[in-house]
Image (tube, rainbow, N blue to C red):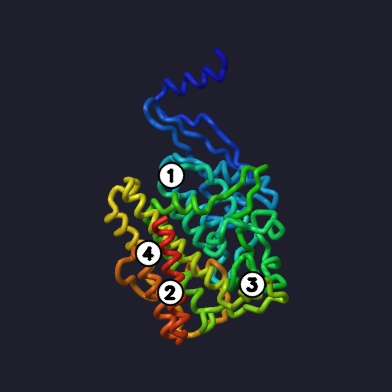
Amino acid sequence: MGNGENIGKWLREHRLLASAVAVVVLAAGVTIPLTVAGSGEEPCWQLPASARALADDPAAATKALDPGDDLTRLDAAKDLLAHEKVCGDGARVLARIVDAATRSAGPGKPHTMAQARSAYAVAAALEDVEELPAGLAPGVARMVAEYVVDAGRDNFIPHDEANGPAIPADRSGPDEDGYVWLGRLLAPGEAHAAFEFADRGQSASPDMEGLVAELAKDPEAFAILYDAERAYLAHYLERLTVQGGDPAYRPPLVERDKNHPSKPTDWTDRDLMDLAGRVGNLMEYRTRYGRDGTIPDLAAFDKSVREHTRGTFRPAPRQLDSLPPMGDIAERPAAGPVRGDLTDGRRQMFTVLDQWAKERKVPARRAAAMRQLVDDAYVRELWL
């Protein structure tokens, strides 16, 4: 009998936990064992003490998860994160590591390239994990919220704009037509995670929609994502013009369609529809999971979501011209407790939009049009 068969026989015959298999996490420089349970028990992955230390050391955590511009170190993030069964409190510690590695250095601090690449690595590492271990979802949801603008973009990405997991701040300016593909109202000096970027050679193709769908099974993660979208709505509205347009808009040098000339509201309308659609997606996941039994007690789930939500978010009564980094958007202070049914996403958005329109004296026709596009996008995603 060979050595491999002897080891396998020993593991099968012993019921005591045994650290039998190890993989090396290159960036962290630690050995991570797989703990194998006895007969009838599922094996779980054991997070070692050397990796636990990353949760309290943001710089080291970022270094451990940073895949590099060419993604050659992506396997380190996969080795650390891509597990469905994690022993003990390991998943909760991993959640703290994800948060430490990807979060900005503090209020007013933009994301660095290394932090943005690390956020990309988290999403790429979890791409093939069918079910997140209990305790990991809230930390990953905080990462998604921390990059609320980047995580909310469509999957389309111009190939000539991004060729790696993160985009430096100096490449996020407007083109000759005044268009910024990364989004509008962006903070200066902030790097952006290019979650849309795929590198088949490195087996990297993050699926943000699928990741959010998985996170939405956890009530705390659901609350974090929902808070981030509602905070983003308040942040976005208070920076628009009285017509609901982009304050940085400038007409294109050459009008591409003279029958439908560009307007300052074109891209802000699309942004609002995308945001409303993401809220609709969250509510669709909730409904689906309640129906198929993934969420066994929907009332208890909703109660937990409400307990975890930070409150409601309201736009300032005047137009603001500040451009805070994404982390500050997600950490926006709540304006008060939630009123009404929290899971009625349409009503929650309408309350914010209507108050903004009233306080800013938005023309009735424009306010009604904005309300309709939010309604259309929300309902479409809720029922699709």
Task: Residue under label 4, please give it.
Answer: 309
Q: Quadrant of the C terminus?
A: bottom left
Cα distance in 3D space between marks 4 and 2: 24 Å
Eyeballing the image, is 255 above or below 169? below
Q: Which residue lies furthest to the bottom in this view?
A: 361
Amino acid carrying mark 3 in the image:
Pro
* Label 1 secondary element: loop
Number of numbered tags placed on the structure image: 4
Residue 322 vs 379, above or below: the answer is below
Cα–Cα span, label 2 and label 3: 30 Å
Please give the name of the residue rendered at 50% of the width and 53% of the height, measured from the top-left corner. 209
Instruction: Identify the secondary structure beneath mark 3.
Output: loop
The amino acid type found where label 2 is placed reads: Arg
Q: Residues within 10 Å of mark 2 (few under 14, many from 20)?
A: some
The residue under the point 59% across, 78% down is 264
Residue 316 position (above or below residue 128): below
Q: Are discs 2 and 3 less than 8 Å apart at CB?
A: no
Decide if residue 195 is on the left or right side of residue 93. Answer: right
Measure how far apart labels 2 and 1 are at the Cα level: 39 Å
Horizontal and vertical percent position of residue 34: 50, 34
Q: Do the residues labelled 4 and 2 touch (CB within 8 Å)?
A: no
Is residue 95 rendered to the left or right of residue 177? left
Q: Say which label, 4 or 2, has the lower sequence index.
A: 4
Looking at the rendering, which quadrant does residue 171 occupy? bottom right
- State the quadrant of the N terminus: top right
Q: Name the residue under label 2.
A: 371
Image position of 143 with respect to 314: above or below: above
Numbered label attached to residue 133: 1
2 or 3: tag closer to the N-terminus: 3
